[in-house]
Image: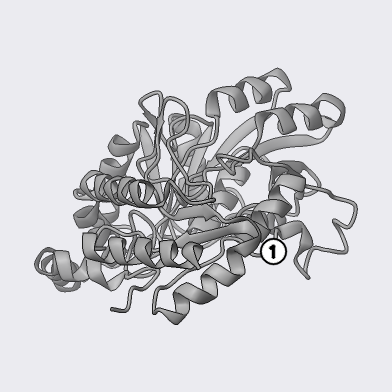
Amino acid sequence: MTIPIADPGASYRRFAEEIDEAVLSVLKRGWYILGSECEKFERAFADYCGVAYAVGVANGTDAVELALRALGVVHGDKVVTVANTAVATVAAIERIGACPVFVDVDPFSQTLSPEALQNYLRTNSAGVKAVVAVHLFGSLCDMPSILEVAERYGVRVVEDCAQAHGAEVSGRRAGCWGAVGAFSFYPTKNLGAFGDGGAVVTHDPALAERVRMLRQYGWRQRYVSDIVGLNSRLDEIQAAILTVKLKALDEDNMRRRTIAERYRAKLQALPVVLPGDPPGGKHVYHQYVVQCGGRRDELGRYLRQHEIGTAVLYPIPIHQQPAYAERFAGVSLPVTEKLARTILCLPIYPELTDEAVDGVAEAINRFYAK
């Protein structure tokens, strides 16, 4: 049995009738950009996240960039974030001309360490305009502690929620903690489009209005640019698809949690570190990431030989990647660097069967029994 690491096409097969109807409706209407479907999805997604406003944009990278621009981050400002993330986070910072600053992560949650943030800002707060707190693999950062540190130094917080749709801490979902939240709807996300898409969410009407202007050339009135903006719009077809899939997001997240519990029951006796809920929170398992120590690569090869997909997210921390290594040669992030050597992602998505989960777990147990 072949078990892929992800199967984004499976969600279409589940929702085919509703999605076909929604897409055909858009095609017949003949309005494809910033119309009623986008507005409908924005309202529904804002309600889901527990915020007042959601603004659909073209992708998650743009969402982070527009969130930072809306907060007034400009060329030369410093933005604190982590190197244990997709390069998109840093690409968004650098497109503004801002300077990314990397701090280390917590070894269990693998997200921004409030202590590391505090240690940096204590002596280096000058020029820091924002923090991008990256929720990773389906789990939120320690947002109460991060916000406490950021407020102490007068720094705004952007949540990078690309991997945390529906994740919670203290009953509050991703996107409703910081000044702004940035989401991706890449097809493999917990809420995935059938192409690219993203959204910026906020409680602040002024920030929401600024993002709306920034996503379309700085227009408040058509063809009149009041500020410098760009072209980053969520199209009507993707919005219609996302509206259909949003209705099942909680159910899908619960299935991911059930799969994670099944993995835990079958792998907990092994010499690996398994993921779990953050304190007072709910993990939604965008990825199921196991810390395997020094046998990570060997285990990955073994699973692939048995037709089980795996991934390493992320194999090279951003500060050590070829495009960045020279500039950040003096940066040391011990926890981030250790995680890059030891973590392995196992298959997890709502359509994954119990039989497949058991097959993955049995293969891992055979490997460690060798």
Q: Nearer the viewer, residue 278 or 76?
A: 278
Is residue 16 rendered to the left or right of residue 54?
Answer: left
Q: Position of residue 328 (x, y in %)?
A: 85, 56
Q: Give whichever of 41, 3 is nearer the camera.
A: 3
Q: Quadrant of residue 205?
A: top left
Left or right for 93, reference 186: right
| Residue occupying image coordinates x 35% and y 36% | 49
Residues packed near mark 1 inside 10 Å, few (<14), some (14 to 19) or many (20 plus):
some
Whether residue 144 is situated above or below residue 27 in the rendered picture: above
Q: Which residue is mark 1?
A: 316
Q: Residue furthest front?
A: 370
Image position of 137 (left or right of 8): right
The structure residue drawn at horizontal position 71% and vertical position 56%, both measured from the top left corner, is 94
- Residue 174 location, quadrant: top left
Residue 99: where, in percent of width, then height?
78, 49
Residue toward you, 267 or 308: 267
Name the one closer to the observer, 89 or 288.
288
- Callout 1, which amino acid? Ile
| Residue visible at 64% across and 64% down in the picture | 315
Secondary structure found at label 1: loop
Name the residue located 64 percent from the left edge and 38 percent from the top edge.
106
Image position of 231 with respect to 149: above or below = below
Q: Position of residue 354 (x, y in %)?
A: 22, 59
Residue 19, visible in the rendered structure: no
37 is higher (above) or lower (below) than 250: below
Q: How many marks?
A: 1
Quadrant (top left/top right/bottom left/bottom right) for the N terminus = bottom left
Res. 98 in view: yes
